[in-house]
Amino acid sequence: MRSAATPVPVQRVIEEFSRLPGVGPKSASRLAFFLLRSKGDQTEALANALLEMKQRTRFCSTCFNITIDELDPCAVCRDEQRSPHLLCVVEDPLDVIALDRVGLYKGKYHVLHGALSPVDGIGPEDLKIKELLSRVQQGAFKEVIIATNPNLSGQATAMYLNQHLMQLGVKVTRPAQGLPVGGDLEYADETTLARALEGRQSM
Amino acid sequence: MRSAATPVPVQRVIEEFSRLPGVGPKSASRLAFFLLRSKGDQTEALANALLEMKQRTRFCSTCFNITIDELDPCAVCRDEQRSPHLLCVVEDPLDVIALDRVGLYKGKYHVLHGALSPVDGIGPEDLKIKELLSRVQQGAFKEVIIATNPNLSGQATAMYLNQHLMQLGVKVTRPAQGLPVGGDLEYADETTLARALEGRQSM
């Protein structure tokens, strides 16, 4: 998208936007020119929010979710309303948001920051697994829910974690797999349908 | 997407990303968490590029395309390789980039910053039309190509401009409308097909 008609400062913004996931060069130009035309201080607001996010946040040293610098352990880890006996293991901070939105889960979290994937060279030492095992070893947790994604690497990670967690004498569970609510049975893939049948429950 | 598990600085970034066109709350979260995880100074690079773009750019006082503060009139307006007799009128700076990429056009530009749209309350005084007419009145231009978008408001703008430009004794043209190259005739809409037939040329 380089063009003599585009000044360098605008080209730099387009390039930086293009580096974001799911933003191609055309969308990046559109975003840059949208901000150029925007009234008020929208551009500054975005820039300052980005800088503040980078400067003021860190990973919680207990659960490895995102927290602000002044609050480590994070708000969820400190929350005494949440059960100290229940731990939910997820791949990503975004998964914590998704689960928290449901509002049903009232235990603690542990963020792995990825899933095992030998193909991509991601092994146990690249994830927060050692930290998870040492948290569980301290003995407060009675159940660990492994909520890694229901895909190949998520399943592999769950199986790996299960092997190690079982030795610590803790109950290990995994969220149910089956038909998504509101979905169509005829459009469900074979594996999902198989899981739904295997996991059938009496009405 | 507000959640107790998301620190305020991250929520602010998500909100600012959500205000961009085509970025929904889910993509905004994904972008924020991508940047949180990014190695190096990608977040700062984006933030600083945004601030510099806002601080160092302005609209060219001649053609109203984007230029840097130190360069007004802009590089295109100053470029003596470009014909001083040919003017291309577009709605947006992005249109200048698109035309410039083709590399065929070697005249000057004039950016209207929008198109006439009574429904949205956009009249002639909201666009750089007065400035266009005064540029043409100065007499150097022999042909004005009205390259506003081939849609309702773009066509209305072209007709409005044509009425006023004709009185200034300048030749007014509009880019050809017809079948897009590489497209399928059977998928062309009726209006496009009608224009393609009307504008047919001998082989």
Image (tube, coloured by chain):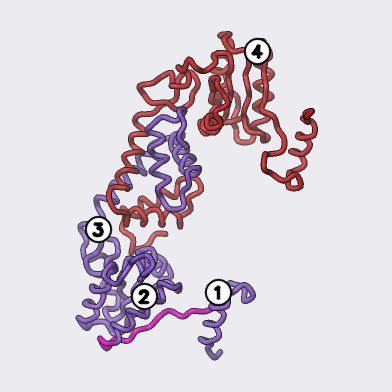
Chain colours: A red, B purple
Q: Secondary structure at mark 4?
A: loop
Q: Nearer the viewer, mark 1 or mark 2?
A: 2
> What chain is tagged by disc 2?
B
Magenta span covers which residues? B167-178
For marks 1 and 4, give the CA distance.
65 Å
For marks 1 and 3, give the CA distance.
36 Å
Q: Was residue B190 drawn as part of the magenta stretch in this picture? A: no
Q: Nearer the viewer, residue A191 or B78?
A: A191
For marks 1 and 2, give the CA distance.
25 Å
Numbered tag placed on residue B58 in the rendering: 3
Q: Amino acid at mark 3?
A: Arg
Q: Secondary structure at mark 3?
A: strand
Q: Amino acid at mark 4?
A: Val
The earlier-in-sequence mark between 2 and 3 is: 3
| Predominant secondary structure, magenta span | loop
Numbered tag placed on residue B157 in the rendering: 2
Q: Nearer the viewer, mark 2 or mark 4?
A: 2
Circles 1 and 4 on the same chain: no
Q: Nearer the viewer, mark 1 or mark 4?
A: 4
- Residue A121: image quadrant is top right
> What chain is tagged by disc 4?
A
Q: Amino acid at mark 1?
A: Val
For marks 2 and 4, give the CA distance.
71 Å
